[in-house]
């Protein structure tokens, strides 16, 4: 695998600092007012948020994996498909690993609206890691392949996913955003490595079709 550039080294260093911050306090500064602002702008009924949240739960998450795998294969061939699988697998491993070593309390109902009693740690956000590893991966593919509809649709989907988790009070905003950042950094590194790898197939299937 090619050595990552300084941008990736800086990005992963900042990500590590944010994970440490998440692990050492119940929430980051600004989380409660930001969460209240988001909740105030959204419908109070949780049905839509529960539906969106369910998209990244197992076994439904495997459908997102298939979508990412198909998108990666369409734009970049077998390397794109392999990167999609590695993106998903990497975030599953990260989620399991972080949950073994840290626990962050769920948002307090005295600070924001909380729907139900979600179990486990608020950070990392399993939803955000898996959504970022699939929908976010497609967004990155769209940026790399200069497909505006892909990255625009992916960006909107990530925003909707963020809003859904905050609407339910399942996470603080920083829980979701830091988890998204982990997934997107990992996906970007995989795609850069794929693009930099020596290959006789310099054109993707989609590019060949357009030619």
Image (tube, grey):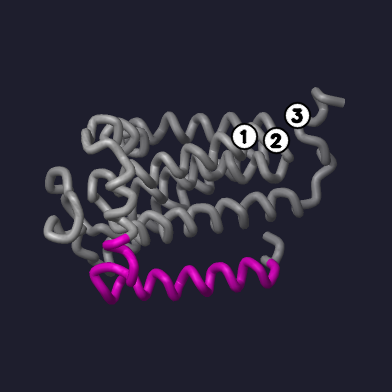
Please tell me how crowded label 2 is: few (under 14), some (14-19), or many (20+) other residues with Cα within 10 Å.
some
Label 3's element? helix
Residue indicated by mark 3: 205
Residue linked to disc 2:
147
- Give the secondary structure at mark 2: loop
Residue 50 % position (x, y): 26, 35
Graded by Cα atoms within 10 Å as few (under 14), some (14 to 19) or many (20 or more), the crowding at tag 1 reads: some
- Horizontally, residue 193 falls left or right of residue 36, namely right
Mark 3 or mark 2: whose residue is earlier in sequence: 2
CA gap, disc 2 and disc 1 = 5 Å
Q: Is residue 9 magenta?
A: yes
Residue under the point 23% across and 59% down: 121
Tell me if residue 196 is in the magenta stretch: no
Find the magenta span and give its range. Answer: 5-33
The residue that mark 1 highlights is 150
- The answer to whether marks 2 and 1 mark residues whose Cβ atoms lie closer than 8 Å is yes
Q: Nearer the viewer, residue 3 or 102?
A: 102
Give how far across and how far down residue 158 sits, in percent: 46, 43
Instruction: Give above or below for 107 relative to 81.
Output: below
The residue at the point 57 percent across, 68 percent down is: 11
Instruction: Tell me the residue at 45%/72% (across/down).
Output: 16
Q: CA distance from mark 3 to mark 2?
A: 14 Å
Say which residue appears at 37% left-offset and 61% top-offset.
174
Figure quadrant of the C terminus? top right
């Amino acid at each position: 695998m090619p050595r990552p550039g300084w941008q990736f080294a800086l990005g992963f260093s900042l990500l590590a600092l944010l994970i440490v911050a998440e692990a050492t306090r119940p929430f980051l500064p600004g989380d409660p007012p930001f969460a209240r602002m988001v909740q105030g702008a959204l419908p109070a009924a949780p049905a839509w948020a529960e539906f969106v949240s369910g998209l990244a739960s197992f076994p439904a998450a495997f459908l997102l994996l298939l979508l990412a795998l198909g998108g990666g294969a369409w734009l970049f061939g077998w390397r794109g498909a392999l990167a999609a699988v590695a993106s998903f697998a990497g975030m599953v491993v990260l989620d399991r690993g972080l949950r073994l070593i840290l626990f962050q309390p769920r948002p307090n109902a005295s600070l924001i609206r909380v729907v139900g009693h979600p179990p486990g740690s608020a950070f990392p956000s399993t939803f955000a890691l898996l959504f970022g590893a699939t929908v976010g991966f497609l967004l990155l593919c769209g940026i790399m392949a200069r497909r505006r509809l892909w990255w625009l649709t992916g960006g909107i989907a990530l925003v909707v996913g963020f809003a859904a988790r905050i609407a339910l009070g399942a996470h603080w905003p920083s829980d979701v955003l830091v988890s998204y950042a982990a997934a997107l950094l990992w996906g970007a590194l995989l795609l850069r490595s794929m693009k930099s790898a020596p290959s006789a197939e310099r054109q993707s299937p989609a590019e060949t079709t357009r030619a």
